[in-house]
Image: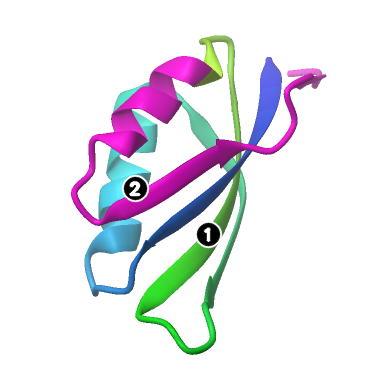
Amino acid sequence: MMQHQLAIQAKSCPEILERILRVTRHRGFQVCALNMDHITDSDNVSIELTVSSQSSVNLLFSQLMKLVDVARVEIKHKESQLISA
């Protein structure tokens, strides 16, 4: 399976993490690592998400961008890493 790292900036609201994880699961991606921090002097959070799947990460990227409270999604590593299953 391929491993991908995403950097997400979103509005800080109680349900945002649940929404992101639901979209991730519904698109067939497995969460490998997750880190979330509040952005100083802002009402936003920064989420570092590492996922694995055989699907293209562009599918997850486009679905996350459709979420209302998500401001930005960036694929951190253009060259994804191959991990053994």
Q: Residue at x 22, y 65 (%)?
A: 15
Q: Which residue is mark 1?
A: 47
On screen, 24 above or below 48? above
In the picture, residue 54 is in which quadrant?
Answer: top right
Q: Secondary structure at mark 1?
A: strand
Position of residue 83 in the picture relative to residue 21 (left or right)? right
Q: Secondary structure at mark 2?
A: helix
Position of residue 66 in the picture relative to residue 84 (left or right)? left
Position of residue 53 in the picture relative to residue 14 (left or right)? right
Across the whole image, how many numbered discs are drawn on residues? 2
Q: Position of residue 48 (x, y in %)?
A: 60, 54
Q: Residue at x 52, y 65 (%)?
A: 46
The type of residue carrying mark 2 is: Ile
- Residue 20 — which label? 2
On screen, 30 above or below 41? above
Crowdedness near tag 1: few (<14), some (14–19) or many (≥20) residues, C-alpha within 10 Å: many
For the magenta stretch, what is the residue range?
Answer: 58-85
In the picture, residue 76 is in which quadrant?
Answer: top right
The type of residue carrying mark 1 is: Ile
Q: Position of residue 19 (x, y in %)?
A: 26, 50
9 part of magenta stretch: no
On screen, 82 above or below 60? above
> In the rendered structure, which disc, 2 or 1, sits on the residue that comes first in sequence?
2
Q: Residue at x 49, y 51 (%)?
A: 8
